[in-house]
Amino acid sequence: MGTDAWTKTRREFERLRELAPAERERWLREQDAQGTPAARELRELLAADAAHDPLLDTDAPTLQAAWQQRSEPDVALGAEVGGYRIVEVLGEGGSATVYRAEPSGGAGATAAAESVAVKVLKPEACSPGLARRFEQERETLTGLHHPGLIRVLGAGRLDDGRPYLITEFVAGEPLDHYCRRRALDLAARLRLFVAVCRAVHHAHRHLVVHRDLKPSNILVSADARPKVLDFGIAKLLDPARDPLWTDLYGRGPLTPAYASPEQIRNESITTASDIYSLGVLLHELALGASPYAEPPAEREALERAVATGRRRTFDACAHAGGQTPPPDDLAAILERALALQPAERYASAEHLAQDIECFLAHRPLLSRSEPWPRRVARFARRRPWTMAAAAALALVFLGSWIGTQRSLSRVVASEGVAWRAHANAVRSTNLLADLLERIGASALASDELTRLVSETEQHLAELTSEPEADARLRMALARLERARKNPAAAETHLARALELSRTTRGLSWNDRERCLDSLIELRAQRGDPTSIDLARERLELLRAHGETVRAAEAERTLSGLIERFGPVLPGAKGARR
Amino acid sequence: MARPFAGGTAVATTHSALELEVVALLRARRAGDAAAGRRLFELLYADLRALARRRLGDERGGHTLAPTSLVHEVFLRLERAALECEDRRDYLALAATVMRRILIDSARRRLFREELATLDGPAASAAPAAALEQRVLSLECALERLERVDPELARVVELRFYLGLEVEDVARTLGSSTASVQRDWRSARAFLKRAIETEESDGH
């Protein structure tokens, strides 16, 4: 075929493939009738265009990588394993090799369609621990049946005693790669994500936590169906079924870029941990970039960022990923899935899936029924300016409202009403405190805010009977004052809040720790040795609550202060001031 | 980034010897030095193979082999070495040819091994497993044909298939839009698939 002939054919082909099938067929028939020789070629091209190709739908580096074998294959090609014949090496990892195999009896085309994956533990990797994990993967998977999860077809041991696992073979590519390669739009990416959520949810319902969800563990087949694999470090949550229950608290292998904060901090793992990893996945699919600024190679820095929830803003990520910033609802979904506290995340992967579906259908999110203070707070985080005004408004309401409630409770001496008034006051104050904190330094230039601070202070005087609300407002004010370069005022508020936090039931040790932390810093800056006592109190507090990582940090702070000010003898506290 | 290469002499210390050598060879080659071209080919051949092997070792024991575009990695590395635009296009074209060579060599070697296995083993019968290797060889013929009738499409195939570059990167390299690369790739793919399959059915 010459250049001109092909150019013509190509133009026809490119036009035809955009047509509806019926229309295309009609045109081709006409050509057939006219005896156009190109008609047959066009048909073949269209057929080729529509069909999957084992070679062209991968790429040379991928193929080459799959073909590279470090040495002799560990199980000979052609060998029989569990009724299947080993055909080729699919991949090789640190501890296991994965082969493609076909039914022994099968022949040719049918056999290829029935390919399976056979995972064999390497001889050098046959430590009891790994063998157990391998065994566990088999047991875990055998109990799960879902189109989105890899199916186990068999298992056993080779002649030399090494365990093997036969699973279905997924001819697909990792999720991220698949999306990028096909240049899928946001909606298509999200639909894939929903399918992944459903598969994970199925595992969760069977008390299996995957613990290592990441794009390379999710393969998408040619017909756009994702499958979750590699349950190698999955855990059963049912202690009765899991003899390694205590292992749950030991940190297994993990991928920091996708791990949850509690995983990094070596705390107990629940299904919420997988929700977080799904959140990271969603983040990458939607924004084209990781939530963290730290590259995976800087493992320690990355782990710190994950553990403390130090994420980049969505806008910054979208910019880095070459995407548009996420719409509000999608941002809300991400916030929720990526919440630092497991309890604040989606209750299940199914809930997450449903919210994505709502987003896709432009319906209000189901999670919008969450408590409104949290919603407002989230809004505040994104729009500090608007919120400065909103907070001022809230304050006005709060003032008149507290007053009303007070007199009401005084008049109606019924205990129930009084209690409700109290609860409401606390709740609104919490909201206000939250708002004040979220407004942060960004809007501090405004006079509005100065007025806000002084008005809030006036309300503090009325809050003496509400120690919890009092403390919270003071903590929020302290932050604002610090940002306003007014450390003395901040210190006064914090000292009072700390005092309250020691005696008030509604405040948690976390609140106390936060007060201590800020106060230590302020006093140390001022060169006040009483910061040593506070640092000691903070250290004990953290130790008492098993916060080992942060306790270590608190200890360093303490020793730094002691070094600076010299040891403070008990009883000599006041003397140094 | 400022160009650290003045008159072909490397002054930067942050780049690997390979990066520097490749850049120097690219220059020499453009200046008409045939030996530089050969040396460059050998260098890349060894590097890409080593890279493939290393990537494989990195993967943890899953089923997956991340289809990492090995060349893409080299490409990024050279981007760090502040390749000029011309150098980069040159380099990519060359890398694609190298990858083509590597793939064919691998396919041949594997076919040969397969043959040996059927000779001494309990005959695993006419192995369907060799289908992909055969296809790689057929693809080479088909691509040669495409090069003759539509060199532009062949260029897309080299970058897209042999180098494993993403559509966007192909577009950037060729200075065209992703949409047109997408369209070209689809046409090229259909051409090649049809050519391969025609050859196969003729051969049997």
Image (tube, helix red, strand yellow):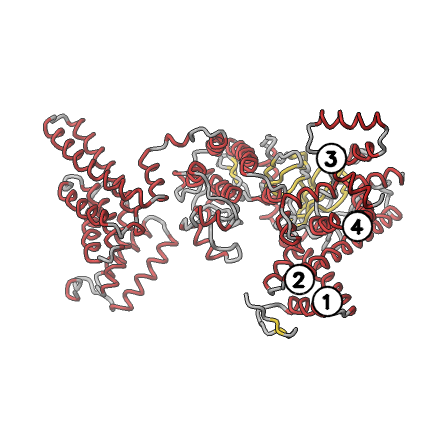
Please tell me in which quadrant of the rendered image residue A232 appears.
top right
Q: Which residue is mark 1?
A: B30
Q: Neighbour class for label 4 at 10 Å: few (<14), some, many (≥20)? A: some
Mark 4 secondary-structure assignment: helix
What x and y, as percent, mark residue A538?
A: 28, 54
Q: Chain of mark 3?
A: A
The amino acid type of the residue labelled 4 equals: Glu
What x and y, as percent, mark residue A53?
A: 74, 39
The amino acid type of the residue labelled 1 equals: Arg
Tags 3 and 1 both on a single chain: no
Residue A91 appears left or right of B200? left
The residue mark sitting in front, 3 or 4, is: 4
Dot placed on the residue nearer the N-terminal end, 4 or 2 = 2
Q: Which residue is mark 3?
A: A51
Q: Quadrant of the N terminus of chain B?
A: bottom right
Residue A567 position (above or below residue A269): below
> Residue B147 bears which disc, if any?
4
Mark 1 secondary-structure assignment: helix
Dot placed on the residue nearer the N-terminal end, 1 or 2 = 1
Residue A440 position (above or below residue A466): below
Mark yes or no: residue A133 visible.
no
How far separated are the C-alphas under marks 3 and 1?
41 Å
How far separated are the C-alphas under marks 1 and 4?
22 Å
Q: How many marks?
A: 4
